[in-house]
Structures are given as structure tokens and as C-alpha cells.
Image: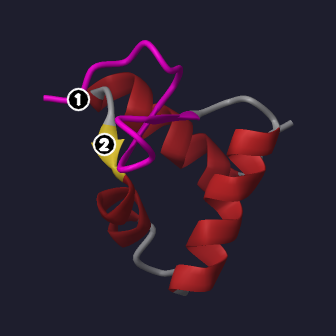
Amino acid sequence: MLLEDERYVVKWLSQYGALPKTQVIRLLRDKKPQTAEKIIRNLKREMQIADVGGGYYLGLDKMCKPD
């Protein structure tokens, strides 16, 4: 079961495709950057998201193509 913030990140990536990591952190604006990094790290560990483009972008899987 995903936490609320984790569900938001997965929803954004499913709607918009691959996003820059810094943009995802900014979208979690009510969280500290360290907390946002932890949310992203947990989603990667659970294999809900993956690094795309050498880690600059985040996507639902490695096959996502950034715009």
C-alpha cells in the first residue's frame, strides 16, 4: 500500500510521463527536499518508478521517454 505522497508521484508520472527529478521534488512542495528524496528512494526500492536518462528523469519504467 502506497502512502498518499507516493501515490501522487506515481499519478504524476502516469499522467505526464517521465519528469525531471528536480520537478518531482518541487511538486512535493509541502515536504522538505530530504523527505521528497526519501519518498523517491522508497518508490524506486518498491520498483514503482525507475531512473530514466541516466538518473536525470524519473518514469514509471526504464522504457519511458522524456520529452
Which label was assigned to residue 66? 1
Identify the residue position indicated by label 2 in the image.
19
**Residue 46 in which image quadrant:** top right
Give whichever of discs 2 and 1 has the lower sequence position.
2
Q: How many marks?
A: 2
Q: Residue at x 45, y 68 (%)?
A: 28
Cα distance between the residues tagged 2 and 1? 7 Å
Assign the C terminus to one quadrant of the image.
top left
Assign the N terminus to one quadrant of the image.
top right
Give the secondary structure at mark 2.
Answer: strand
Q: Report the magenta residues as a range.
A: 50-67
Position of residue 31 in the picture relative to residue 22 (left or right): right
Q: Residue at x 40, y 77 (%)?
A: 29
Q: Position of residue 61 (x, y in %)?
A: 53, 20
- 2 and 1 marks in contact (CB < 8 Å): yes
Give the secondary structure at mark 1.
Answer: loop
Q: Position of residue 21 (x, y in %)?
A: 39, 56
